């Protein structure tokens, strides 16, 4: 891949990210849901004073025009400020960093384990070519390659979380 192709790919990625973010802001803007009721809750909103509600509306930019709100968000995002997570009450960049680190660790562990298990099973099948071990390992490989990953995940969740109660 040449440097020119890499540059074009990066430009396309940037344009795609901008268009997706604009689409997300547009969809949130035209949504019939009230952002205060959705994020705070009807009961909590009913117990707030009008001043508190006005502060929340100002903080979330409810009365700010969508274009101005998007430009403000995009400017903050380009400076590294992704905002605060409503769920975790922490900066979004820190939450993403933690979740990404956990995901990368899980991915690397699964990759190493599957590589070692695959190598061992491949050697075992090759050592007994045409025998029962080879046929069982080949059938297992064909079965696991044929089963959709999401279906297998649901079955394993049902087994380990519901029946065996090993997972939370």
Image (cartoon, rainbow, N blue to C red):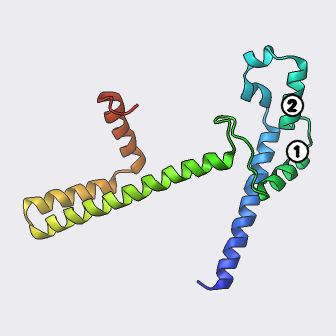
| Residue receiving disc 2 | 57
Report if residue 129 is visible in the image: no
| Residue 65, image quadrant | top right
Relative to 153, 70 lies left or right: right
Quarter of the image where the N terminus is located: bottom right
- Sort mark 1 into few (<14), some (14-19) or many (20+) by Cα contacts within 10 Å: some
Residue 8 image position (x, y, % from top left): 70, 77
Q: CA distance from mark 1 to mark 2?
A: 14 Å
| Residue 113, image quadrant | bottom left
Residue 50 image position (x, y, % from top left): 90, 19
In the displayed structure, 148 sits above or below 14; it is above
Q: Secondary structure at mark 2?
A: helix
Report if residue 108 is visible in the image: yes
Tell me whether circle 1 and circle 2 mark residues in contact (CB < 8 Å): no
Q: Which dot marks residue 138?
A: none
Q: Residue at x 30, y 28 (%)?
A: 163
Relative to 104, 79 lies left or right: right
Residue 38 image position (x, y, % from top left): 73, 28
The disc, 1 or 2, on the residue closer to the chain's N-terminal end is 2
In the displayed structure, 102 sits above or below 40; it is below
Pick whichever, 17 or 50, lies toward us: 50
In the displayed structure, 48 sits above or below 122; it is above
Q: Residue at x 33, y 28 (%)?
A: 165
Quarter of the image where the C terminus is located: top left
Q: Residue at x 82, y 17 (%)?
A: 48
Residue 159 image position (x, y, % from top left): 31, 34
Give the mark count.
Answer: 2
Q: Residue at x 17, y 68 (%)?
A: 123
Which-is-in-front pick, marks 1 and 2?
A: 2
Relative to 167, 13 lies left or right: right
| Residue receiving disc 1 | 66
């Amino acid at each position: 891949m040449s440097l020119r192709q890499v540059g074009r790919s990066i430009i396309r990625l940037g344009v795609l990210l901008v268009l997706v973010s604009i689409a997300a802001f547009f969809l949130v803007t035209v949504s019939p849901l009230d952002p205060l009721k959705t994020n705070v809750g009807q009961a909590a909103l009913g117990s707030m004073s009008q001043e508190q509600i006005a502060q929340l509306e100002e903080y979330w930019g409810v009365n700010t025009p969508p274009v101005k709100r998007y430009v403000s968000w995009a400017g903050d995002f380009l400076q590294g400020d992704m905002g605060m997570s409503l769920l975790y009450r922490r900066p979004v960049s820190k939450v993403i960093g933690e979740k990404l680190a956990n995901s990368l660790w899980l991915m690397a562990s699964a990759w190493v384990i599957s590589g070692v298990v695959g190598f061992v099973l491949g050697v075992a099948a090759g050592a007994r070519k045409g025998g029962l071990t080879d046929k069982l390992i080949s059938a297992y490989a064909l079965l696991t390659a044929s089963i959709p990953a999401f279906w297998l995940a649901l079955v394993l969740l049902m087994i380990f979380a519901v029946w065996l109660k090993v997972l939370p």
